[in-house]
Amino acid sequence: MTDVLSGVGRRTLVMGILNVTPDSFFDGGQFFHLESALEHARRLIREGADIIDIGGESSRPGAQPVPEEEELRRVIPVIRALRQESSVPISIDTYKASVAEAALEAGANIVNDISALRFDSRMVEVVARAGVPVVLMHMQGEPRTMQHNPVYADVVREIKEFFAERIAFARAHGIEKILIDPGIGFGKTVEHNLEILRRLGEFRELGCPILIGVSRKSFIGRLCGTAENPLPPSERLEGTIASNVIAVLNGAQIVRVHDVAAHKRALAIVDAICYAGREPKGGELYGDQHKEAPRDGREGRSCR
Ligand code: 7PJ
């Protein structure tokens, strides 16, 4: 397979979420069994997903860790079966090196690590050896406790410093294809999430493609409802699209979503406006990462 992310910088890529967990907050575990997981994957592909992100451990706030054998039992059969019938790029959403390794062996093409290679010391070697792209996501704390009073002096500055260190670490171990993700909802208040989306352009200075995951997250429920009575996840599509449009305007190149069809339509418009007649620039394609970094991280896309 050629570079699975060759579209980056030419249009916005859509990563479709496939949760293979009994406790996933939105799909409520309905895709836990192999056949229903595959059916959902097929639907995401039909709707135009550029990447399928498969995860076997819920990382929603307060979630308990899943034992390695259970995570393997959930995701590996799905990856193997999906790879049999489709060449769609598959990313594995895990922070466990053994799960990433087995997933890559079963046909996955990208490692999406919410811990940015920190939780499992072997992960960096697994990714480096496979030569695949990695998503480095920022999180303050750990899923079980991360929403207990997260504090930052300057949320964007601190996440940028975190990325600078993590990118250097990954490169020092021979990883070349690096995506960054500020980790919306992972140890962040509603205000932190909003500030990250507002100032997302500042992350472009780091020279790595930016991935964003806002899909149906709780800040949308709170803003569309109230803190005491948030809009439920099933009602958060419009807020999700609004957030993703802003993220793309501010430099996100990949959006991680539950609702692929709706985003393909919305992004057809956004991309027609923002990507028109535009060649990929530095920081948007691998290999160009050190060339022509935007001088002012606050500047928007070409449409501004
Ligand atoms: C994210 C993720 C995210 C990346 C989850 C959920 C919680 N991976 N895995 N970015 N979120 N890279 O989908 O609500 O935001 S699990």
Image: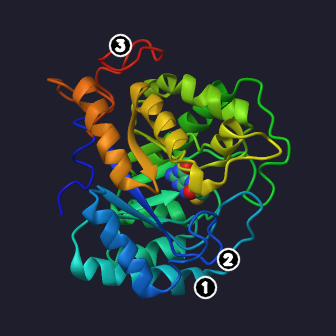
Q: Nearer the viewer, residue 188 or 38?
A: 38
Residue 107 percent coordinates (x, y): 31, 75
Q: Give me the C-alpha separation between circle 2 and circle 1.
A: 7 Å
The answer to whether 208 appears left or right of 280 in the picture is: right
- Check whether the beta carbons of the residues at disc 2 and disc 1 lie within 8 A of each other: yes
Labels 3 and 2: the sequence-earlier one: 2
Q: Which residue, given by chain and number where applicable, does mark 2 sit on?
A: 66
Asked if the beta carbon under badge 3 is closer than 8 A to the nearest atom of ligand 1, the reply is: no
Q: Considering the numbered disc 2 on the image, is that residue within a helix, a strand or a loop?
A: loop
Residue depth check, mark 3 versus mark 2: number of the one nearer the observer: 3
Residue 304 numbered mark, or none = 3
> Residue 106 falls in which quadrant of the image?
bottom left
Callout 3: helix, strand or loop?
Answer: loop
| Residue type beneath disc 3 | Arg
Residue plotted at (45% across, 52% down): 257
Mark 1: which amino acid? Glu
CB of mark 1 within 8 Å of CB of mark 3? no
Q: Around disc 3, counting alpha carbons within 10 Å, would you say few (fewer than 14), some (14 to 19), or many (20 or more)?
A: few
Q: Residue placed at 35% from the left, 13% from the top?
A: 304
User: Between tags 1 and 3, which lies in front?
Assistant: 3
Indicate which disc, 1 or 3, sits on the residue closer to the N terminus.
1
Q: Is residue 181 visible?
A: no
Distance in Å between CA atoms under marks 1 and 3: 47 Å
* Residue hosting label 1: 70
Look at the image and tell me whether residue 6 can be seen. yes
